Amino acid sequence: MSILRKIALGLVLLVLILLGLVAWMLRSRAEEIPDELPAINVAEADPQKLVIPGSGGLGDLVLADLKGRTVYIIVEDRESMAARESSAMSRAMARWNYPDTVSGFAVGDAEGFGLLASKIEEFIGPMRPELRLPLYIDFQGAVTKTFKLPKGHVGIVVLDPAGAVVYRHSGKMEPAEIEKLRDLLGATLPAPAPAPAFQVGELDNAACAGRTCAFVFLGGPVARKDIPGGKQGFDGSTDDSVKQFAKPDVRLAGIVVDSDAKLDSGKVSAQLVGQIDGAELKRWKTATDSTEARAAFQIPAGEAALVVLDPQGNVVMRELGRVPMYKFGVLSEFIGVELSDRDEP
């Protein structure tokens, strides 16, 4: 056999091995959720000895150092995220106000993916500022093992100030369970804040009564070609797209474009204050910048902002500048649009 043939055969075998490894790593590992989670074996894995190495500027997560505080840990993996098991819980938790004595952490269960650790860290680096909680990657599966949580499902654990586990849940949460969690954490819903008297384009307090009203204020014009996503969108590398999407005006213009065709105009009125060149909007009405409207909602001149009113006339969202992506879920809840499901051409 010639040397070239040997090299070719070796390369084929290497590719087959790599494909087999990838298939093994990406296999489903979701376990059935039992009616009652197994008891935690402290002798086998004491939660107070749990340490998750930090990365991306985060120090190690050492549970023993958090005694005196109520601590909650949310753990997800690729399968639970794909199934969106945590959607209802995450959207609710993103709205709550928490006592100063509560600390929360997100953990990505990446057991078995240690070989890809550098690539995973590289991928999640730009995402960290977009998240509500500090994110740790658990390449040993220590969290699921310690707290006896089934693989392949979202899980949440709550520890009291003494370090005792007082709550565990695996899988999708129903409203009653979410309310139970809120009570355990001592979290509260924001107090209603009635909207001020306003006039934005065709919308005012009377026009918004009994329906959701959403307002996006842009600090300056945005071109459709500058918004990442879709055939008409920004043409650049992944890194350049991430930087582009970090711009407050571009991000909010992207929300407008994403949601336009999906809004239920029978329930939601949407007003853009600004300009998106090259975008034909169907449900978002457009108005020029308004000093009076900005003054009503306390939005500085030239600053991008998002404001949402509920059907009772309360301001339920008021975000200035760059809206972090975890709040997209909250916005989705109010306007009835999944912003992560982009199918805009």
Image (cartoon, helix red, strand yellow):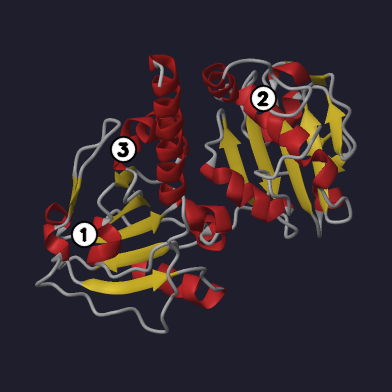
User: Which image quadrant for residue 33?
Assistant: bottom left
Q: CA distance from mark 2 to mark 1?
A: 41 Å
**Callout 2: few (<14), some (14-19), or many (20+) C-alpha neighbours within 10 Å?**
many
Q: Amino acid at mark 3?
A: Leu
- Return the residue at label 3: 115
Q: Which residue is mark 1?
A: 69
* Camera-nearest residue between 288 and 280: 280
What residue is disc 2 on?
228
Say which of 10 and 67 sits in front.
10
As displayed, is residue 285 above or below residue 76? above
The percent coordinates of residue 110 (x first, y second) are 35, 48
Q: Secondary structure at mark 1?
A: loop
Residue at the image position 26 percent from the left and 30 percent from the top: 57
Q: Determine whether 235 is above or below 176 in the image.
A: above
Residue 156 falls left or right of residue 101: right
Q: Picture coordinates of residue 261 (x, y %)? A: 84, 42
Lower sequence index among marks 1 and 3: 1
Q: Nearer the viewer, mark 2 or mark 3?
A: 3
Query: In terms of image quadrants, where is residue 285?
Result: top right
